[in-house]
Each structure stands twice: as structure tokens, then as C-alpha cells.
Amino acid sequence: MNFQVTVLKILVAYPDGFAAMEDLKRDMAILATSGRDWADRTRRLAARVPDLDIFCQGLVERISGGWKITARGRQVLQFMEAPPAAEPERQALIDQAKAVPETEPVPRLTQPADRAKRRRERRERRREARERARANAS
């Protein structure tokens, strides 16, 4: 199953193209267990746009609590589902899908300092838990 094609297909089915993460996960689980037909279909669709990257190409944007398909994402999905076009048109659409979006880069979800702080806190909690376990064992 091609994850990125599945995300596009799920998002396009929601009103305004937005789905909360819980809904996305639920729908992904349903489609992942729906059998070989879905996997074959997403593989065929993904073959129409090699090197598909929904975030780097600006096809999907992260919004607090979920993901939203962009107008460009709808165009690429429509292209993938359309009958094969003339080769020059097809190549132009593939090149357009590969192009890096002109908008700002997607902000990182967490800053490296936040990650380091969480890692330190996690280590500290583990150390304290080990000490409590040793104290309780004796």
C-alpha cells in the first residue's frame, strides 16, 4: 500500500479536505486491512507520479490537529486517477508535481532544543524510576 496516495485519497473524501489525525489513522487502518485490491490500486496510482512526496511538494499541509489537502494535491490526485494523457502533457504534470512549492518551507514540528529537553527529562524520569525500584527491592 502506498501511504502517500492513501493519504491523498482519504483527505479528498473529507469536507474541505481536512481530517483530524485520529480520523486519518482510523481510515488508514481500514484501508490497510481491506485487502490486496487497495494496495494494487494505490501502487498503480503512485506509478503515475514517481518520487511523490506529499509534504515537500506542497500537496498536503499540516494544520493543528490534522492534515489538509491543497488545491495542488487535488490536481495531482486527479491526474493520477485520469486515463493516460498524451505523453508531453503527462510529463509536464509530473514535472509540476516534482517542483518544490514556492511557499515557505513547512515548519518543523518540534525544535531541536525541545527534543533535547524532552530527552533529558525522559532520561531523568527513567533514572528516578530505577532508583525507586532499587529502594523498593531492598
Image (spheres, rainbow, N blue to C red):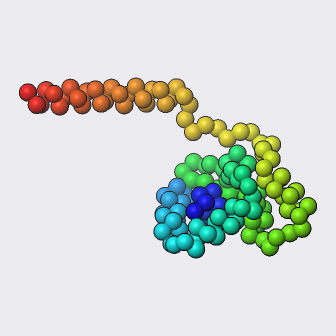
The picture quadrant where one finds residue 137 is top left
The picture quadrant where one finds residue 3 is bottom right
| Screen quadrant of the C terminus | top left
> Viewer-proximal residue, 68 or 55?
55
> Viewer-proximal residue, 127 or 17?
127
- Tell me which residue sits at (72%, 51%) in the image: 51
Q: Is residue 55 above or below residue 19?
A: above
- Tell me which residue sits at (75%, 65%) in the image: 80
- Tell me which residue sits at (83%, 52%) in the image: 95
Left or right of 81 on screen, residue 89: right
Left or right of 32 on screen, residue 85: right
> Viewer-proximal residue, 50 or 111?
50
The x and y percentages for residue 45 are 70, 65
Left or right of 6 on screen, residue 46: right
| Screen quadrant of the N terminus | bottom right
The x and y percentages for residue 133 are 17, 31
Q: Is residue 92 above or below residue 44?
A: above
The x and y percentages for residue 114 are 50, 29
Q: Would you say residue 75 is visible in this rendering?
A: yes
> Viewer-proximal residue, 127 or 88?
88
Q: Would you say residue 17 is visible in this rendering?
A: no
The x and y percentages for residue 60 are 67, 53
